[in-house]
Image: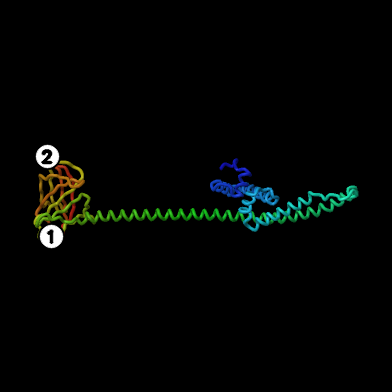
């Protein structure tokens, strides 16, 4: 609602409750932002009170006036004052008609003297009434302004509480996501650190080796070998590399060679590539080992694929 479209007629409709909810909110926003606009609304209400006291409102307007502008004691006192003031002005404006020809011919000095006596009395009455009206009006304005400020403060508190609740919900969501991520990473590390042996035949156990196992870390792959094991099968997984064949060499962490196998072939295992090799279980005593995997190119040259660290535990 633009400022130039807010007429006194529109403010009268606001005071009588005839505006839509959207128009009413915009008028109230202007009242909080513009003190002169608020004073202008009070003048319009005073005009409505005078019109009501003088009987110049229609029946529908009078009913709405009584519904919206006669709800408090201050409002009723203002209307009563307006009626008294209108009565005084009306009595002062109607001069009593002379009842005889003798009165019409009275001395002009007597007339002037009587009027000079009545003027101070009427002025005193008007000043007393005006003073009372000003006191009532000031009290009403202060009460109305305090009420509006209280409503605005209440709305601001509601908005602040909603913002705090939203911030708390966002904080809880972040904490939940972080906790879920920690659990996921923990499960992945646990699966890598404790691979389960797969027995495909009596005396044979199988294990999976991954390149992301780091030496001397909590994620080092552990191979738990039962006492009756004859053969150990290792599936070395990797992501990249495509060679004619592969060479695997088993060493201790000190670099001492223990076992070697060549002519190995790669195969698919899920989304990874894998090279499988089988070696005697008696080669692996308790301790830490490195499996070095190399690829053999078509030219017969060796290319490093990766090194797999693991620890053997004998049950």
Residue at the disc numbered 1: 226
Residue drawn at point x = 13 percent, y = 38 percent: 298
Q: Nearer the viewer, residue 128 or 277?
A: 128
Q: Nearer the viewer, residue 49 or 247?
A: 49
Residue 262 image label: none
Circle 2: element type: loop
Left or right: residue 112 versus residue 186 is right
Query: Which quadrant of the figure contains the N terminus?
Result: top right
Q: Residue at x 60, y 43 (%)?
A: 6
If the image is split into quadrants, where does the C terminus sit?
Answer: bottom left
| Mark 1 or mark 2: whose residue is earlier in sequence | 1
Task: Please say whether residue 282 is visible from this viewpoint.
Answer: no
SS of the residue at dot 1?
loop
196 is higher (above) or lower (below) than 241: below
How many C-alpha atoms fall within 10 Å of the one at disc 2: few (<14), some, or many (≥20)?
few
- In front: 13, or 115? 13
Q: Which of the 4 image quadrants contains residue 205?
A: bottom left
């Amino acid at each position: 609602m633009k400022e130039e479209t807010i007429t006194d007629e529109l403010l009268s409709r606001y005071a009588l409750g005839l505006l839509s909810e959207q128009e009413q909110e915009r008028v109230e926003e202007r009242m909080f932002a513009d003190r002169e606009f608020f004073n202008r609304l009070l003048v319009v209400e005073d005009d409505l009170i005078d019109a009501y006291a003088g009987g110049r409102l229609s029946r529908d307007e009078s009913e709405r006036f009584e519904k919206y502008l006669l709800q408090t004691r201050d409002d009723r006192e203002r209307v009563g004052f307006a009626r008294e003031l209108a009565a005084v002005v009306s009595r002062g404006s109607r001069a009593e008609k002379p009842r005889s020809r003798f009165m019409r011919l009275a001395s002009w000095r007597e007339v002037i003297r009587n009027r000079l006596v009545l003027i101070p009395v009427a002025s005193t009455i008007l000043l007393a009434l005006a003073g009372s009206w000003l006191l009532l009006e000031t009290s009403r304005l202060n009460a109305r302004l305090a009420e509006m400020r209280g409503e605005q403060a209440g709305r601001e508190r509601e908005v602040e509480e909603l913002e705090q609740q939203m911030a708390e919900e966002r904080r809880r969501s972040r904490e939940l996501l972080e906790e879920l991520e920690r659990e996921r990473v923990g499960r992945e590390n646990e699966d890598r650190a404790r691979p389960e042996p797969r027995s495909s035949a009596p005396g044979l156990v199988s294990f999976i080796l991954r390149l992301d196992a780091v030496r001397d870390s909590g994620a080092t792959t552990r191979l738990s070998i039962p006492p009756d094991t004859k053969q150990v099968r290792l599936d070395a997984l990797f992501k990249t590399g495509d060679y004619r064949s592969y060479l695997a060499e088993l060493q201790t962490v000190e670099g001492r060679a223990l076992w070697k196998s060549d002519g190995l072939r790669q195969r698919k295992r899920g989304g990874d590539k894998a090279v499988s090799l089988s070696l005697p279980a008696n080669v692996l005593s308790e301790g830490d080992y490195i499996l070095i995997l190399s690829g053999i190119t078509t030219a017969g040259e060796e290319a490093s694929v990766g090194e797999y660290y693991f620890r053997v535990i004998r049950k």
